[in-house]
Amino acid sequence: MTAPADFAKTGRLWLRKALSEADLTPYDAIANCNHGPGARLDLGGGFGVQSALTRAVTAIFPDFQAVRAVVFNKTEANNWGVPWHQDRLIPVAARHEIEGFHNWSQKAGVWHCEPPLAFLNQMLFVRLHLDPTDADSGPMEIALGSHRAGLIPSAASDATSATHETELSTAQRGDILILHMLTLHRSRPAQLPSARRTLRIDFAKAALPAPLEWAA
């Protein structure tokens, strides 16, 4: 299987009902642990090459590997929104001054940096929906095709999103959404917060230049 031709145009691919209930069981266990919103997860077996989610992604995007996993759950106690933006920072094990890798910062003790545009163009971010998500659940909204604009300054994100068709990522349990890493996206607070568990897994095709390594 290969990526459909319109992925290059839209930067978006839905795999509806991609995982069975049996496939989803280990991901429920991961998401149900006491994590804060946006907490990093251990990449371990749950996202290894033989995991159901990774197999579904790499069947379409071969040579990509999972490099980061994060859990989100919008509830009455944890409900939030974020404005239009691109995710351009990657987590690494240690800081090393490599040409093109810049904008260094530390988050929760982990070094992050922004890689070159060519590197970001070989990355995906993938969302596995563990709960049904409708317009009232605070779904992510994406600007289709915005990845083709390259690096978009934060101040220009709203204006750029307004020039693209947008789509709410409403989903059913077991749906997988695959996005180009540079796709503009935002999220509004849930209107009826209950549970909206989503796992986000970043995939990269290119290897990091030594001695940079992905954060464990």
Image (spheres, rainbow, N blue to C red):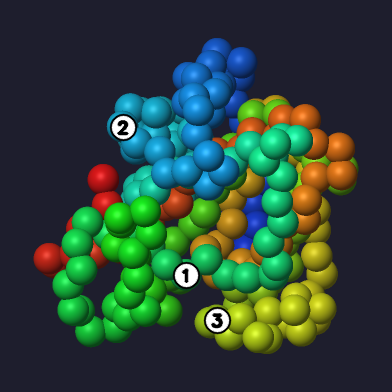
Q: Of the residues shown, which amino acid type is indicated by label 2?
A: Gly
Q: Tell me the tag on residue 103.
A: none
Q: Earlier in the sequence, mark 3 or mark 2?
A: 2
**Residue in view at x 31 percent, y 32 percent:** 44
Q: Secondary structure at mark 1?
A: loop
Q: Nearer the viewer, residue 22 or 75?
A: 75
Task: Tell me: residue 192, above or below residue 130.
Answer: below
Q: Dot 2 lies on which element? A: loop
The residue at which mark 3 appears reads as: 150
| Pick the front one: 104 or 78 | 78
Question: Whole-Å distance between the Cαs marked 3 and 2?
Answer: 32 Å
Q: Nearer the viewer, residue 197 or 80?
A: 80
Residue 34: horizontal and vertical position, in percent?
Answer: 50, 28
Classify residue 78 as left or right of residue 88: right
Q: Which residue is mark 1?
A: 88
Foreground tag (3 vs 2)? 2
Could you tell me the amino acid type at mark 1? Arg
Residue 197 showing in the rendered view: yes
Q: Label 3: how many residues lie within 10 Å, few (<14), some (14-19) or many (20+)?
A: some
Instruction: Identify the residue position indicated by label 2 in the image.
Output: 44
Q: Amino acid at mark 3?
A: Gly
Alpha-carbon span between mark 1 and mark 3: 11 Å
* Image: 72 above or below 109: above
Q: Position of residue 72 (x, y in %)?
A: 59, 41
**Label 1 close to label 2 by CB (< 8 Å):** no
Where residue 32 appears, as percent x and y from the top left, is: 54, 23
Q: Quadrant of residue 204?
A: bottom left
Which residue is drawn at the image coordinates 53% and 16% (left, top)?
A: 25
